[in-house]
Image: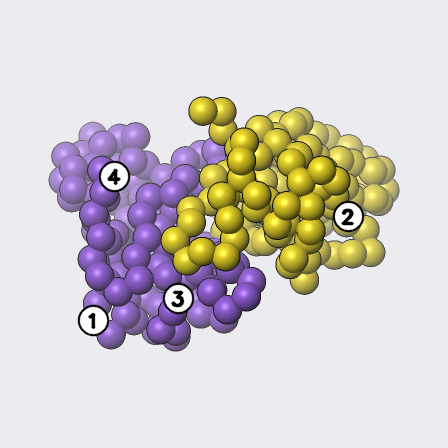
Chain colours: A purple, B yellow
């Protein structure tokens, strides 16, 4: 199964862009990259996902490299409420459609 | 729209006792997932249901864990007997379908289990 590697923690100043990297060097051609975040004492919350192309929604942007071996989640203007653990997940599509969570990146947005 | 509902939110039991967790998914969501999340770790899938059928239970410790989703709507996860190592947060999630490449999962708040 494809797995992801993320830095354990990052800090970001409020109002600045937060760029969260993720390595998924063993990803297969039909496996999606998903990003979720988990605020303390809550369940994970979906942010965005992509296959090959860059994606943007109201929460964030997802930049996937051309070889698909890494990606970056961008929160354009981080707020204190964005403080959370961010999970980069490769979604297996060969029958089980399983999410494989890593340990995530703990993002702390500083006032 | 109501989200995924789980109860109880917290449970403290003695080891060797049984415990059950309940989940009501978002209305219309055919796929239901149970995850376990240990402290400092990401969630780990225990079982996935498509309607009432368990289609992936490979990570469920079947000697002490059981789950059911009798009418394809709400679900119960049971542990009997509980062990100290079962202390974790048990998360339920649902999605409209499990076979499409682009469906997000909606998670409930989880049940925090403490086994003493």
Mark 3 / mark 4, whichever is N-terminal = 3
Image quarter for residue A17?
Answer: top left
Q: Which quadrant would the C terminus of chain A be assigned to in this image? A: top left
Disc 2 designates what residue? B66
Q: Please rate how many residues cluster around mark 4, counting C-alpha atoms within 10 Å: few if below 14, some from 14 to 19, many from 20.
A: few
Mark 1 / mark 3, whichever is N-terminal = 3
- Where residue A100 appears, as percent x and y from the top left, is 49, 59
Disc 1 designates what residue? A66
Labels 3, 4: front one: 3
Q: Are marks 1 and 3 on the same chain?
A: yes
Disc number placed over residue A31 in the picture, else none: 3
At x 63%, y 49%, the residue is: B49
Q: Residue B105, relative to residue B14: is it above or below? A: below
Q: Nearer the viewer, residue B30 or B44?
A: B30
Disc 4 designates what residue? A59
At x 58%, y 40%, the residue is: B92
Measured in 3D between alpha carbons, the distance from the residue under mark 2 to the one under mark 1, in whole angstroms, is: 43 Å
Q: Are marks 1 and 4 on the same chain?
A: yes
At x 61%, y 31%, the residue is: B24
Which element carries disc 3, helix, strand or loop?
A: loop
């Amino acid at each position: 199964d494809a797995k992801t590697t993320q830095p354990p923690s990052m800090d970001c100043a409020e109002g600045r862009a937060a760029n969260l990297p993720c390595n998924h060097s063993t990803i297969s051609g039909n496996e999606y990259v998903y990003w979720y975040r988990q605020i303390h004492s809550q369940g994970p919350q979906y942010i965005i996902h992509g296959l090959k192309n860059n994606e943007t929604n109201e929460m964030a942007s997802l930049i996937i490299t051309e070889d698909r071996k890494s990606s970056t989640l961008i929160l354009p203007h981080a707020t204190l409420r964005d403080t959370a653990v961010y999970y980069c997940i490769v979604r297996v599509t060969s029958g089980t459609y399983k999410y494989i969570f890593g340990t995530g990146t703990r993002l702390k947005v500083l006032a | 729209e109501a989200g995924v509902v789980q109860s109880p939110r917290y449970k403290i039991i003695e080891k060797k006792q049984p415990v059950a967790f309940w989940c009501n998914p978002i209305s219309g969501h055919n796929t239901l997932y149970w995850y376990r999340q240990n402290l400092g770790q990401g969630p780990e899938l225990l079982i996935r249901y498509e309607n009432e059928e368990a289609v992936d239970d490979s990570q469920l410790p079947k000697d002490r864990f059981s789950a059911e989703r009798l009418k394809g709507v709400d679900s119960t996860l049971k542990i009997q007997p509980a062990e100290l190592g079962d202390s974790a947060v048990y998360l339920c999630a649902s999605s409209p379908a499990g076979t499409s490449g682009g469906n997000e999962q909606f998670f409930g708040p989880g049940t925090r289990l403490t086994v003493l």
